[in-house]
């Protein structure tokens, strides 16, 4: 029995009571990025490819991975790197295949409805082979090849009229199917092509269907095709290649036998050699099917009149195979059931408003509770690639596991993605007037911000708006206005406007607040990147806590002496996204901040941009007490993220504090993580603290017009 395997062993195994993919706990990933999600094992993918290649090694076939099974760029790239070619059926798949790194010399192009544009694109890339399915298509290809002065390699796809004994919807080689050419028609075309200037008939192609688990349909077909090739050779058409398509079946049910690939190879290879042919194959499901699973969470248990339903957070839009073909997928709990777990018969259904939205019917499963995670096994092929956003449900993320490591290879879609390509027509735009701008007020360790989603460029003059709405006595009141805008580099861009209307480069607390906002509004996920004027930063959200990776600090100047009102003050300068001047004091409460800070802020040494000012007291352990005067606010604020970072780093250089440093500010505690290298160099600088919503509201028409 062959399941997803490495040396015969499945890549999905229970370990310590939990389902693992390779050496990674799957529920940990689900906890971190949410469900539903698709997850793939790198090891299973490689193993599947190597096994197929090994089985057919006597004839060294060109293995063209069928992108339709799963066209994720990372998975494709892994296969391209292993030496695979690509089987494509559209211009989009051509685009993705090239992007993934498949050589055009290893790309074959099938499909009954290739458009002129798709053919042209493929011709310009000089792909290896066109698999032609009709006379009309051949004529168009010949004309285009002539226009582009090409001699194009072609195989004709034959409809062999052989029953592969698989699901009716995935049979493609029967005479009632739309695919391929009848043999008589094919012969006629081959003979015509002998004199073609622009088409070179190179091979023969067939594809019987998908999920075929018996070898005899293949043997029958290869025999038939070999005979046909011999006949054509006598007629002066010397074909070199036989493309046997894909369709190799895998074992979806524990007790079901997959196609015996070694047996198939041992029977086909001699025929290929005997007829002096080169073999091409187009496996899809075989390579990715058992390398992937879909993870979903039980939302509710619901007892119907006759059935027990488990309603999960994945729907037929995420995995359509059960709805489309009545396909069977094994279901595993991520938490290993004990041998004595009670069993129950359930229907596993999704939230989509269709009765076909189910994953299993009358399935006997160990009893599962609300909130538990389930894995739908063997969903690596025709899972994500057939997913849609039906019911306006954003597409799920995809994860690749390699041993103990996992990587997000496709982020979860957010609501914004649902409308990315839409535009409300100009005529309809003004039908419903929108005079108000929604905002959320958030606070991050004492800094409070008004956050507005400005991706539609609602705000004409952000500086003026900031001046108005940040005013504590007259309006909402805040330390700053944060605008979330589109970015080409990161998930989104943050712009910060101070209450005086000026624009700041960066603010650590602001970044944490806007990351929380983006997560809550489903603009970004738990991990995201933010473009700021001070550089791009990384964020991670865990409940109310948000951790952000800071830019590498720069412009360190230790022991700077300033003369203020006839006295000398010594401090340290560091830019942590914005400039900070750090002064140590034995008791920060007693420092005359109101008097000193404005003078330092505008001191000639820091012209033209000025500096923020931080008074720092080292208390016990790795704890600092910090008071910050912020430029732009022109006052002491309850907390400042970049100030906390600057204080901790300078504290590490001058007072021996080490990571993680707790920075106590009036507004609460921040934690600074960093690595200190040689020559006062810092790396891996992170700032962590709370960021939470205070309230939501709408900015009125009057404010919008400022
Ligand atoms: N080649 C062609 C022409 C196909 O139409 C298909 C699937 O429909 C495949 C290859 C891949 O099939 P499978 O994923 O079953 O291997």
Image (cartoon, rainbow, N blue to C red):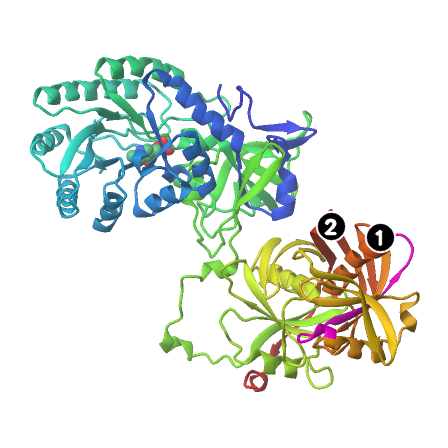
- Asked whether mark 1 and ligand 1 are closer than 8 Å, the reply comes as no
Judge left or right: residue 101 versus residue 221: right
Residue 194 shown in magenta: no
- Asked whether mark 2 and ligand 1 are closer than 8 Å, the reply comes as no
Task: Indicate the position of residue 463 as horizontal and vertical percent values.
Answer: 60, 80
Q: Is residue 260 visible?
A: no
Circle number at residue 679: 2
Task: Indicate the position of residue 494 as horizontal and vertical percent values.
Answer: 59, 66
Q: Quadrant of residue 130?
A: top left
Please report the bounds of the magenta region as a residue range: 605-622
The quadrant of the rendered image in which ligand 1 is seen is: top left
**Discs 2/1, front:** 2
Counting residues from the start of the chain, the first of labels 2 and 1 encountered is 1
Dot 1: element: loop
Task: Indicate the position of residue 12 as horizontal and vertical percent values.
Answer: 57, 29
Judge left or right: residue 649 versus residue 296: right
704 shown above or below 170: below
Q: Is residue 608 visible?
A: yes
Foreground pick, 676 / 45: 676
For image coordinates 25% across by 45% down, the residue present is: 124
Q: Quadrant of residue 322?
A: top left
Looking at the rendering, in which quadrant would you find the C terminus? bottom right
386 shown above or below 86: below
Q: Which residue is mark 1?
A: 657
Instruction: Tally the numbered discs.
Output: 2
Judge left or right: residue 454 versus residue 469: left
């Amino acid at each position: 029995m062959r399941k997803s395997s490495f040396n015969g062993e499945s890549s999905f195994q229970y370990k310590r009571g939990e389902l693992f993919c390779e050496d990674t706990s799957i529920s940990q990933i689900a906890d971190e990025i949410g469900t539903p999600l698709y997850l793939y094992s790198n090891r299973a993918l490689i193993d599947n490819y190597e096994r197929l290649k090994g089985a057919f090694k006597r004839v060294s076939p060109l293995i063209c991975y069928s992108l339709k099974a799963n066209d994720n760029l990372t998975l494709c790239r892994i296969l391209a790197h292993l030496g695979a070619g690509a089987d494509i059926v559209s211009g989009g798949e051509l685009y993705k295949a090239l992007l993934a790194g498949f050589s055009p010399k290893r790309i074959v192009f099938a499909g009954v409805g290739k458009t002129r544009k798709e053919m042209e694109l493929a011709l310009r890339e000089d792909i290896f082979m066109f698999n032609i399915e009709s006379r009309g298509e051949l004529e168009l290809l010949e004309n285009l090849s002539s226009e582009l002065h090409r001699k194009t390699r072609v195989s004709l796809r034959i409809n062999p009229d052989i029953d592969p004994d698989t699901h009716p919807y995935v049979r493609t080689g029967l005479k009632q199917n739309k695919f391929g050419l009848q043999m008589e028609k094919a012969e006629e075309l081959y003979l015509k092509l002998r004199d073609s200037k622009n088409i070179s008939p190179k091979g023969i192609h067939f594809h019987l269907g998908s999920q075929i688990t018996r070898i005899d349909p293949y043997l029958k077909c290869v025999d038939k095709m070999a005979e046909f090739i011999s006949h054509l050779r006598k007629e002066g058409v010397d074909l070199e290649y036989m493309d046997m398509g894909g369709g190799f079946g895998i074992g979806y049910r524990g007790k079901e036998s997959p196609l015996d690939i070694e047996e198939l190879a041992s029977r086909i290879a001699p025929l290929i050699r005997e007829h002096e042919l080169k073999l091409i194959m187009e496996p899809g499901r075989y390579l990715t099917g058992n390398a992937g699973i879909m993870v979903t969470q039980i939302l509710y248990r619901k007892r119907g009149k006759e059935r027990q339903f488990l309603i999960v957070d994945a729907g037929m839009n995420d995995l359509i195979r059960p709805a489309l073909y009545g396909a069977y997928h094994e279901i595993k709990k991520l938490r290993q059931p004990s041998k004595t777990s009670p069993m129950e018969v359930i229907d596993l259904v999704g939230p989509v408003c269709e009765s076909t939205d189910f994953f299993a019917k009358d399935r006997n499963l160990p009893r599962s509770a609300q909130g538990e995670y389930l894995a739908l096994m063997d969903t690596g092929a025709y899972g994500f690639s057939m997913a849609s956003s039906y019911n306006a449900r954003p597409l799920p993320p995809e994860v690749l596991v390699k041993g103990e490591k996992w990587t997000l290879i496709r982020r979860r879609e957010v609501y914004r993605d649902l409308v990315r390509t839409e535009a409300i027509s100009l005529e309809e735009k003004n039908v419903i007037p929108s005079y108000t701008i929604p905002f959320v007020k958030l606070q991050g360790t004492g800094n409070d911000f008004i956050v507005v989603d400005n991706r539609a460029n609602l705000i004409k003059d952000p500086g003026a708006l900031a001046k108005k709405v940040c005013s504590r006595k007259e309006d909402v009141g805040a330390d700053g206005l944060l605008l979330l805008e589109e970015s080409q580099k990161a998930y989104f861009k943050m712009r910060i406007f101070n209450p005086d209307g000026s624009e700041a480069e960066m603010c650590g607390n602001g970044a944490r607040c806007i990351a929380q906002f983006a997560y809550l509004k489903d603009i970004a996920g738990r991990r995201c990147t933010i473009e700021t004027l001070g550089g791009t930063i990384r964020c991670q959200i865990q409940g109310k806590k948000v951790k952000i990776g800071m830019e590498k600090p720069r412009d360190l100047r230790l022991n700077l002496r300033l003369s203020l009102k006839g006295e000398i003050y010594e401090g340290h300068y560091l830019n942590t996204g914005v400039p900070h001047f750090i002064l140590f004091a034995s008791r920060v409460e007693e420092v005359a901040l109101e008097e000193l800070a404005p003078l330092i802020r505008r001191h000639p040494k820091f012209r033209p941009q000025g500096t923020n000012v931080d008074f720092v007291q080292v208390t016990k352990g790795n704890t600092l007490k910090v008071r910050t005067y912020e430029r732009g606010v022109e006052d002491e604020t309850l907390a400042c993220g970049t100030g906390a970072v600057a204080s901790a780093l300078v504290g590490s250089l001058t007072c021996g504090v080490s990571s993680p440093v707790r920075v106590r500010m009036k507004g609460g505690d921040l934690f600074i993580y960093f690595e200190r290298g040689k020559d006062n160099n810092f790396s891996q600088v992170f700032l962590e603290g709370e960021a939470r919503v205070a309230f939501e509201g709408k900015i009125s028409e009057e404010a919008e017009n400022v």
